[in-house]
Structures are given as C-alpha cells and as structure tokens.
Amino acid sequence: MASTHNSDIPQFVVIHDQVHNTYKHPIVHYVFEDEPFPEVAKENLILVDLDHNAQVDAIDSYSPHFQVTNCQLDHSSTAYDQFDADHDGTGLMTIEGVSAPRA
C-alpha cells in the first residue's frame, strides 16, 4: 500500500451550509493511523477518512445539527486564485451539508 504524502492532504477546509448559504473555516485536527484521537465534542465533529491516495474514502457528521451531503477535493490552482501566493499543490476540501434548527 502506498503511503499518503503530506502535500496530498488538504490544507484548507471549508464547510458550506446549503440551508443558510454560509461558509465556515473549521478547526481541523489531522489524525494519522498510529496516533490517538483527540478529544473533540461529538456535536462539532465531522470525520473525514482519506484513502492512501488522499481521496475521500468516507465522511460522517456526528452533529445532530449538520448533515453532510457532499465532499469535494480540489488540488487545482483555480481554488487559489484569490490568494497572491504561488500554488504549492496543497488541496482545498469543501464539505457541503445542511443544517437543522437547534432546539
């Protein structure tokens, strides 16, 4: 099995709430197979599993207030047009989903 290179792992993550048409930049924890899982409140947890080619293998939202509908990885330079820096190959992950009203 080929190993995942750090440059293949998305460095930018955006969550798009399709109900409110809002974007959020979440706090991201990268956890590799041999590392312990950090303590994160489940109501704020979206778990993304990448395969050995750094493609999305599975995605699950543990939040009762947000459910994932799609996840896209973009390693192209068009995602970086808004920045003045050169594109270094790092990826952008966009997590699409719908929010539910909080009780």
Image (cartoon, grey):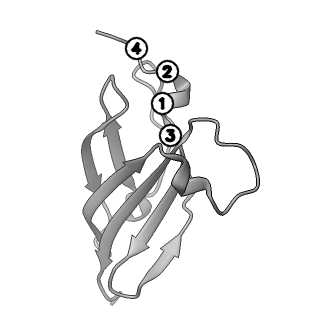
Contact flag, marks 3 and 1 (Cβ < 8 Å): no
Q: Position of residue 31 (x, y in %)?
A: 47, 33
Q: Are marks 4 and 1 in contact (CB under 8 Å)?
A: no
In 3D space, how far apart are the residues under numbered discs 1 and 2 (Cα atoms)?
Answer: 5 Å
Comparing marks 4 and 1, which lies closer to the viewer?
1
Q: As rendered, which of 83 and 34 lies closer to the eye?
A: 83
Q: Which residue is mark 1?
A: 8
- The amino acid sitting under disc 1 is Asp
N-terminal of the pair, mark 3 or mark 1, is 1
Q: Closer to the camera, 45 or 54? A: 54
How far across and how far down the image is residue 70, in percent?
26, 61
The answer to whether marks 1 and 2 mark residues whose Cβ atoms lie closer than 8 Å is yes
Mark 3 / mark 2, whichever is N-terminal = 2
Q: Is residue 75 left or right of residue 54?
A: right
Query: Residue reaching furthest right?
Result: 84
Please tell me the numbered disc located at residue 3: 4
How far apart are the alpha carbons under marks 4 and 1? 10 Å
Q: Earlier in the sequence, mark 4 or mark 1?
A: 4
Q: Which residue is mark 2?
A: 5
Per the image, label 4 sits on a secondary structure element best described as: loop
- Amino acid at circle 2: His
Decide: is 83 above or below 28.
below
Q: State yes or no: discs 2 and 4 in contact (Cβ < 8 Å).
A: yes
Mark 3 vs mark 1, foreground winner is: 1
User: Hey, what amino acid is under mark 4?
Assistant: Ser
Position of residue 10 relative to residue 61, above or below, is above
Is label 4 or label 3 in front? 4
Residue pointed to by mark 3: 38
